[in-house]
Each structure stands twice: as C-alpha cells, then as structure tokens.
Amino acid sequence: MAKPHSHSSLPLSLLLLSLLLTPSVQQTHKISTVDLRALIAIKNSFTDVPSRRGSPAAFFSTWNFSAPDPCSTFTGLTCASGRVTTLTLGTGLSDSPGLAGSLPPSIADLTELTQLILFPGIVTGPIPFQLDRLASLRVISLTNNRLTGPIPQSLSLLPNLHTLDLSYNRLAGPIPPGLTRLPKLKVLILASNSLSGEVPYDVSSQLLHLDLKRNGLTGPLPPSLPTTLRYVSLSENDMSGPIGSVFDSLADLVHLDLGSNRFGGPLPQTLFRMNLQSLLLQRNNLSGWVPPALSQPPSYGEGSIVDLSHNVITGELSPILAGVESLYLNNNRLIGTVPRAYVKSVCVGITKTLYLQHNYISRFAVEPGSMLPDTVSLCLSYNCMVPPVGMEACPANAGTDLSRPASQCSVFNYG
C-alpha cells in the first residue's frame, strides 16, 4: 500500500514557497506575493563566498522567509507599500569577497524596482534580458564580477534609467545603440570589459559621465557629444581618426581621457582654452604643437594633470601649462628652451611632476645651486643638453643616457 505523500519529499525551496503562500501565512506578510516569490528565487541563485579567514560571509543570514515583514528585516531591501524598490546584493565591505552564482530572470518580477545593485564578487553568466520589464528602474550597478555575454538590447527600453554601471566584467559584443539615446541617462560606465565595435553614432542622452575605457572599441569618435558632459574616458581602446572639434562645445568638461588609442592629426588647440583639470592624450599619433600664450589661459588647480606624452608634438614649449600639478610631455619632438614659468613652478612646488625626457630641448635655465622640493619629480634626460646638476633623477623607463647624441640634435641646429 502506497504511503501518503508528505512535505518531506519536496525540495526545500518548494516546501518553503508552498508554506509561505498558503492563505493563513500569506496574510501575515507585509510584502507582495509576487515579490516574495522572486526573493526566494534570488536567494536560491546565490551563495556567500567564504572570506579568506575561512569564516563564511553571511549576507543572506537575515533572509528568513518565515519573518512577517521581509521589508524591514532583509538586508539589502527597501520597500514601499509592500513592493521592493531597492535590491542591493552583497555588503560592499572591503573585507567581503561578495557573492557567487548568477543573476536570475526572476529579478524582473520585482516590477516596482528602482535600484538594482550588485557589489563586487564572482557572479557569472549573462545579464537577464527580462530587465526591460522594470520600467521604474533608475540605477543598475553590476560592477566587478564575472558577467559574460552581450549587453542586452532590452536595457535600451528602460525609460527612467539614470545610471548604468557594468564595469569590470567580461561582457562582449557591441554597445547597444539605443543606450546612448535613453532620455534620462546621466551616467554610463562600461569600462574594463571586452566590448567591440564603434561608439554609437548617436549620443543624444544628456550624459554627465561617460566611461568606456579598457575595451576593444574601434573606429572614430562620434560626430558630436552632449554638451552636458563633465567626464569622458575612452582610453585603452583601438580607436582612430582625428579628435577634431568634437569637444569644442563641452564647456563643463573637466576630465578628458583619450590615452592609448590610435588618434591622429593635429592636437586640437581648443582643448587648451577649456577648464580641463585632467587632459590625458598620451600614446596616440597626435601632431602639431601646444598653443602659445592665450588671452584667457586655462586655470589649473590642485590635482590637475596633463599627459601629452608619446605623441609627435613639435615646436617650442608654450608657457600655458606651467601651472599644471602633474605634467607629462616626454617622448615628443619639443625643442628650444624650457620657459621660465615652468622652472619657477617646479622650484616652488606648484608643479610636482614635470617629465620632459626624450625630446630635443636645449636648455633648462635654473639658478646655480637651486634645489627642488622633496615633493617634486623632474626628468630632463635624453634631450639636447646635459641636465643641471642635482636634477638628473628620472623613472627607470627613461633610460640611462643623460643626453642625446649630437648627431640627432644637429637636425635642430644644436650640433
């Protein structure tokens, strides 16, 4: 005779769900039944990664589904009127290794969600394409994990999305063109993935922050960018073509990083009329020269950095960069005497780093016996002169030669 079916033969998750959703128990929960179901599936999709000390982390320790009010007791949850509005997975603490597992499609059942945050861990697999059902979603932050696959096209259908940060994962494929047309998107961070193709042609979102560095992007810059931008980083890709006038109308831009690409053509003079506090154009194929003194020179403050190294910039050094705190002009084709403004800025410690090595400079006019502040790093090696006594310190990659062979300098009439 067959034994009566008992709950003990059911999988634990199904048993728990069946108990929670019985009418007598359901009435005691101050949360939507749909959301409760989704939270059970979410918990079953992740595990806590043990810490290096051997003791297991315990992010889900408060997720007790027999509790009457998960909204007030579950770590990482914020609710409104019994619906989950914020879901934060992981603690984000510096000593926490985060979560393992994968993002379940059931997250899309939390239809009132406005913020989805996954702290660093080892979560793998794709980003669920079903997230387009979350019409109220404003923030998606899934950084520093091991997510793979493409960026879902469906994310381009989120009308209220303000911030999208998918950086430091293993995502591949092109950037969905609809992302850069989202009407409310302000922050787009896709750095350090394996994305390919070109930056979308139409960047009409009113972005403040655009970070696409360390990918495999190719092709030219978009023809125009939003005038609202304050931060742009496209470094360490394989982009090419001229910089041109793309950034001319970006009056609020304070950080521009196009380093380590294959951009060519003339160095845009307009970049030196802007109030950029970070201008990073190193390791490209840019030519031309730094413009001479301007009627309204840029104002560089504490923490400012300009890196034009490893290009083919020519001519005499203009004084307009003398107030920059960290200035890298090495490995170019600069000639002549270093303007007095740079010497003074270094000697008083306003400019803390000045790298001029591997150019064709003929003179650095410092007063005999002058000493540099301990906070200053100055490199003048491998130019058409011998660096002044006491100013020969350079990074190891500058080489050991103090000056160029005379035969190389004779091209510039220094022989």
Image: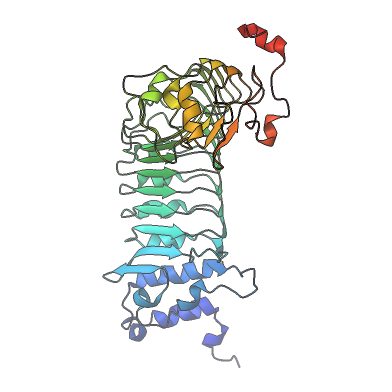
Residue, x 64% and y 32% (percent of image)? 390
Residue, x 66% and y 21% (percent of image)? Answer: 386
Q: Position of residue 61 (x, y in %)?
A: 49, 77
x then y, percent, for residue 217: 53, 33
Q: Is residue 140 above or below residue 61?
A: above
Question: Dividing the picture into quarters, in which one does residue 382 lie?
Answer: top right
Seen from this angle, which residue lies furthest bottom? 1
Q: Quadrant of residue 227?
A: top left
Q: Residue at x 26, y 70 (%)?
A: 81
326 or 59, nearer to the observer: 326
Q: Is residue 237 above or below residue 77?
A: above
In the visual, does 7 lie left or right of 398? left
Nearer the observer, 345 or 357: 345
| Quadrant placement of the N terminus | bottom right
Q: Look at the image and tell me whether residue 234 can be seen.
A: no
**In the image: residue 78, left or right of residue 337:** left
Q: Which residue appears farthest toward the front when viewing the image?
A: 369
Tell me: residue 261, above or below residue 101: above
